[in-house]
Image (cartoon, helix red, strand yellow):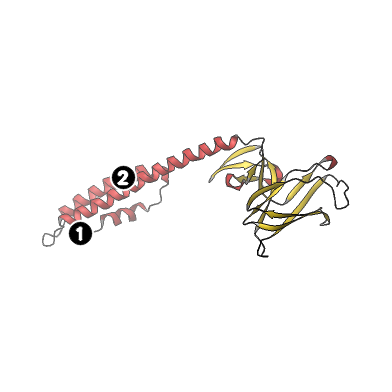
Amino acid sequence: MATDILGSLNASSGATATTSASRTRAKDMSEQFMTLLVAQMQNQDPLNPMDNSQVTSQIAQINTVSGINDLNDTLAAINGQIGKSQQLQASALIGRGVLVPGNDISVGEQGSSLPFGMDLDGPASQVKLTITDGSGTVVHESSYKDQPAGTQSFSWDGTDTSGNVVTKGNYRFAIEAVGPDGESVPVEPLSTGYVSGVVAGENGAKLDLGPHKGLVDLDAIRQII
């Protein structure tokens, strides 16, 4: 009686080899398959021999496994090339400022501050911006009307609610948005980071934005400034 040769091969191999060894594994499985197939045909029950359809089916199975292993090798090579291409593209961002998710603003001498922004899920009839210092005290408030959906950048002159220049340091901001129907609109705050390097990650290139922001994925960039 016919047995499942492919199942026997999978059980013996354990399917634990890595992608880099898949081609060798496929070759070994093919050789084992032919050895088992010949042994099976020599020792089959003469009263219940294996017919041609069974042989064809088992050969098709082992060919399918070999084809899948070859496809995995091809995809791994493609992914490697994509990763290298991403690193080359990302290297062009070194020294550039980018808007990424975050709610911090850095203020320098004489009130000079880095740009910041927001990413609106939908159009907003009213947007309120609130900036606070390290203790949580509100130092600035402003509002904007009829803002479109998407990413937008802002600048702050570094003055407080009394018009005085704030001290040098780090501040935080919050944004609230209301749509034309009066319902709140989801909004993501964006802060500036400067790309100092590119690091190869398991899932692609990552941008090094320094010790404060760390590493971010390329798809975290909302705007290049």
Where is 13 relative to 199, above or below? below
Dot 2 falls on a residue whose secondary structure is helix
- Three-letter amino acid code of the residue under disc 2: Asp
Q: Position of residue 199 (x, y in %)?
A: 59, 40
Report crowding for label 1: few under 14, some 14 to 19, many 20 or more residues within 10 A (C-alpha). some
Q: Which residue is mark 1?
A: 2
Q: Position of residue 166 (x, y in %)?
A: 85, 47
Q: Cβ–Cβ below 8 Å for labels 1 and 2?
A: no
Dot 1 falls on a residue whose secondary structure is loop
Q: Residue furthest left?
A: 47
Q: Earlier in the sequence, mark 1 or mark 2?
A: 1
Question: At 25% from the left edge and 58% from the top edge, which residue is drawn?
Answer: 4
Q: Which mark is residue 198?
A: none
The part of the image, by quadrant, that contains residue 90 is top right
168 vs 63, left or right, is right
Where is 159 relative to 175, above or below? above
Q: Which mark is residue 28?
A: 2
Looking at the figure, which quarter contains the N terminus? bottom left
Question: At 62% from the left edge and 41% from the top edge, which residue is drawn?
Answer: 207
Q: How many marks?
A: 2
Question: At 63% from the left edge and 53% from the top edge, which residue is drawn?
Answer: 149
- Three-letter amino acid code of the residue under disc 1: Ala
Q: Position of residue 139 (x, y in %)?
A: 83, 53
Q: Position of residue 108 (x, y in %)?
A: 81, 41
Who is closer to the viewer here, 129 or 24? Answer: 129
Where is 179 relative to 87, above or below? below
2 vs 89, left or right, is left
Query: Between marks 1 and 2, how big is the CA–CA gap?
Result: 22 Å
Looking at the figure, which quarter contains the C terminus? top right
Report crowding for label 2: few under 14, some 14 to 19, many 20 or more residues within 10 A (C-alpha). few
194 vs 54, left or right, is right
204 vs 93, left or right, is left
